[in-house]
Image: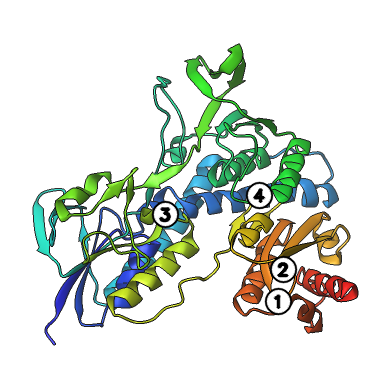
Amino acid sequence: MSQKNIVIIGAGPAGTSTALKLSGKGYNVYIVDEKTGGNYSYSGSVVSNAFLYYSYLFNSFKEKIFPILNLKEEKSFDVDFKKVKKNVESIRNKLVKSYREELEEADVKILEGRARFKNKNTIEIIGKDKTDEIKFQKAVIATGSVEKTLKNINCSKLYYPSNIFSLEEIPKSVAVLGGGFVGLEYATFFKRLGCEVQIIEKEGRLLRSFDEQVTKRLEDSLKKDGIRIHFNKNVQNIEKIGNKTILFLENDEKIESEIVFCAIGRKPNIDFLCPENAGIKIEDGMIVLDDELKTTNCNIYVVGDATGKAMLVNWAYLSSELVFSAILNRPVQKNKVLPKVAYLDPEIASVGYTEEEAINVGFEPVSIKYTYNNLEKSLIIGFNKGFVKIIYDKNLKRVLGAHIIGKGASDLVSMFTLIIEAEIKIDNISGFIFNHPTFAEVLAEIGNKVKSKS
């Protein structure tokens, strides 16, 4: 079998995963990007997750450890943001190096530059000093996503995930535009470090893709923690005056803050690709795809954020598996559930259907709610409030969805993902033995609660 060229455009998690899967399968595999690691490593989850972790350590020390230290005299402490950025950069560099080493070991050819389609089976690679061309038999678009920017706002300095590293020090106050994943993660980060934080959300609730009962508890918790939330507000203008930034809202309302952080959404990063040259159809800024993530050019596929679907790392890997199987004509399970987690204070996590979604696809959903206020594990680490809402089918007793808020939500949602995928009946969960003290004990309590009602 003669080898054929397959080109992966984008070297983030989705592109790298696809390239590694296809290596050694009868293709010359090329991966093209300006930087190995993609936006994911330089302005995406790597940066935000690292920032969140360092802010968590700082806040835990301040709130939990500092008060029990036997200090002879009172000492104040603060965060050296330059050192935080240096540590985050070190983490990023190690991950990028790991990506590159894996690709090289798999004999994937790494090409640096920006790729765009010249025609239906050729890409141009625009490098620093020259432009090259490669013909392909198959291509995969893995260009990720880019942040949406404010339109018609002439403020000289706004912060986004892509330029947050340009901050020299932690500001005293931050206005966060957007109450989605990214906005709330950075609101949490800044609040933990002692900033006054305000969130401006154009809709009537936060995290609209999560269960409403869970997000209401999150909103209450954030407000109790001192974060001000402005719902149903649109920003008309932003002006920088000295060290202050003034946000002008509707109805002559004004908000003052030192800096403004924008998290108003993301979109597929496809503008530079010239997809029309390859016969790829675009509608409303999105690439038109079939069930196999194939474009209107039957030899070109899309993975990860560039699909415009779930902009999560686990989707990057799942979509990579779907495209890999499609290219090699292998069967694959397409209806896997994707858990999602926001590492906030408190954590919030979700997997599967809400009640409304379950009804729409033909189930007879029943919900069960469990509050773990005094779980031993929670009390030990100092976070004693948690809430779980489970959706299951009345007749089948299959778990259909889990929606969680509280410490340990990220651990619990992974377990519920396995339960949903394995189609374990909810009244059978109580038969499993869970270690103590762990958050997993919540599952046994929920199983017992259902069993007692049967």
| Of labels 4 and 2, the one closer to you | 2
Three-letter amino acid code at the position of disc 3: Tyr
Residue to which mark 1 is pinned: 396
| Image location (x, y in percent) of residue 228 | 69, 30
| Residue 101 seen | no
Three-letter amino acid code at the position of disc 4: Leu
Q: Residue at x 62, y 75 (%)?
A: 418
Q: Residue at x 38, y 81 (%)?
A: 331
**Which mark, residue 344?**
4
- Quadrant containing the N terminus is bottom left
Residue to which mark 3 is pinned: 40
Q: Which residue of the protein is positioned furthest toward the bottom in this rendering?
A: 1
Name the residue nearer the viewer: 23 or 437. Answer: 23
| Image location (x, y in percent) of residue 131 | 10, 52
Q: Are the residues flagged by discs 1 and 2 in contact, CB closer than 8 Å?
A: yes
Three-letter amino acid code at the position of disc 1: Leu
| Of labels 1 and 4, the one closer to you | 1
Which comes sooner in the sequence, label 1 or label 4?
4
Residue 64, placed above or below residue 414? above
Which comes sooner in the sequence, label 2 or label 3?
3
Q: What whole-number distance in Å separates the C-alpha atoms at marks 1 and 2?
A: 8 Å
Which comes sooner in the sequence, label 3 or label 1?
3
Residue 245 located left or right of residue 227: left
Residue 89 located left or right of residue 328: right
User: Would you call the spot at circle 1 few (<14 residues within 10 Å), some (14-19), or many (20 or more)?
Assistant: some
